[in-house]
Amino acid sequence: IVGDTMDQLISVVNELHDAFSSVKMSVSLPLPQIAVVGSQSAGKSSVLEAIVGKDFLPRGSGIVTRCPLVLQLVQLPQTNTEEWGEFLHLPGKKFFYFPDIDQEIRSRTREIAGEFSITDRAINLKIYSANILNLTLVDLPGLVSNAVGDQPADIDRQIKEMVTRYISPPNTIILAVSPANADLATSYSLQLAKKVDPEGVRTVGVLTKLDLMDRGTDASDILMGKVMHLSHGFVGVVNRGQHDINTSKSMQSARADERAFFQNHPAYSAIADTQGTEYLAQKLNYILLEHIKSVVPDLKLRVDKLMDSTKKQMEKLGMLEQKRMDPGATMLSLIKAFSDAVSHTIDGGSTDASKDLLGGARLDYIFHECFATYVHGLNVKNLTDEYIRINARNMAGMHASLFPSDHVFTALAKQQIERLEEPSMKCVQFIYEELIKIVDNCAVKIDRFPKLKQAVVDLCRSLLTSIARQPYRTCGLS
């Protein structure tokens, strides 16, 4: 019962991971997790696949992992024979064929990171099986020295900074993967882990490729903690080689060969019980549970504070009342609030002091001071008695009459009215721009619903644009 209760802690932490991944807001809450760090060729993917017991991670040349993969392993009852994966971005869809998981990871990576770049946006994947232990692992891009091909020139810096951000929080366990057939002093993963965890209290070392070491050499001193001290020590693993993968060697056979390797090797037989993938998974499960137990009080305090601050923001925005309202009524209420704000801005009555004319006052200024002043300042141009007499005679032709035709007045008036066309069009433009500002300023009333706000603003802009074009069409300018 105690074991089941402890495993539920990992499930709760996984739910928090999913919740914070789903919301579009920055949440500063470092959750317990295990970050997998290693160079591009250290064998990270092979370690993770061996822990899961399935082929499901993308492989290839260059940087294949270009965004964090949050891998949540969920242990099912032993009576359950089905195994499947689920992505957070594809809710409700189960992947029973694990190569499809590989393809979906590739597709999702291209979608969020493009063809060659890297991104902090994570892919969340849950794997359900009776043959795994409850774990939360974050697979990070492999550390590299130089850019290759079309990769960004500073790809090495970008990856290093991303990995550092993930492993810096004190609630993160660092799984530092290093190849045994290379000098441990040059291990990128251990160098980076030492910078953020100098005492080695939250770093677990993993040595891969033990079977590829030069004949006559071994890593027993490293595995027994004689070379580098880590509180959780080092665990050696023997993964499938590329030939094994190409020939579809099963995970069960690989684990059997791994056990035989440690049991039969003269340097490792004495410590065989504390080596291998199976032991590594058990060790990580135990470490993660103990770590979660130690941080639960602080984590609960942080979650409570976050809930309180969020609740206060929701109360301020009226979002708590929204739960008790019909969605349609809520939308109408918001649109009415926006409409009232526009009317209030134009009709006046603002209680906020300002050094500038706003809303209706600004519209009044444009109409009655800017435009009116220009009109009153117009002088009658070329409208002399002689000019009128000439146009009257021109209109009468050879048929002189005592009273001039009304067409004379129409022609002369039209000529003077045409002088109002340019200032009138400018007045329309000024009024249009001011009304757009009013709409944008009043749209803050529906800020908490960005899509509704955008739809309302777009509709108002479209309507104002249509109305503003009418004077141009009337004057034959459109």
Image (cartoon, rainbow, N blue to C red):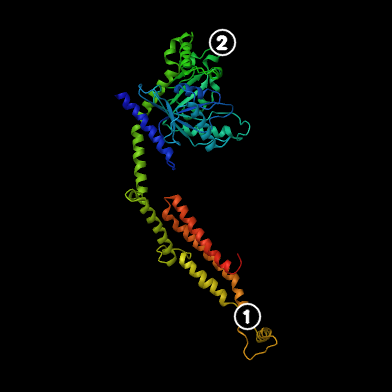
Q: Position of residue 93 (x, y in %)?
A: 43, 33
Q: Residue at x 36, y 38 (%)?
A: 303
* Amino acid type, callout 2: Arg
Q: Quadrant of the C terminus?
A: bottom right
* Circle 2: element type: loop
What is the spatial separation of the Cα atoms under label 1 and label 2, in whole angstroms? Answer: 110 Å
Q: Which mark is residue 215?
A: 2
Residue named by callout 1: 412
Task: Tell me which numbered mark, 1 or 2, is placed earlier along the sequence.
Answer: 2
Q: Quadrant of the N terminus?
A: top left
* Amino acid type, callout 1: Leu
In the figure, residue 298 lies in which quadrant? top left
Q: Position of residue 412 (x, y in %)?
A: 63, 80
Q: Residue at x 39, y 32 (%)?
A: 14
* Circle 1: element type: helix
Q: Residue at x 62, y 89 (%)?
A: 403
Instruction: Tell me, yes or no, if residue 226 can be seen here.
Output: no
Q: Position of residue 267 (x, y in %)?
A: 49, 10
In the figure, residue 384 lies in which quadrant? bottom right
* Placement of 5 over or under 88, stated as above or below: above
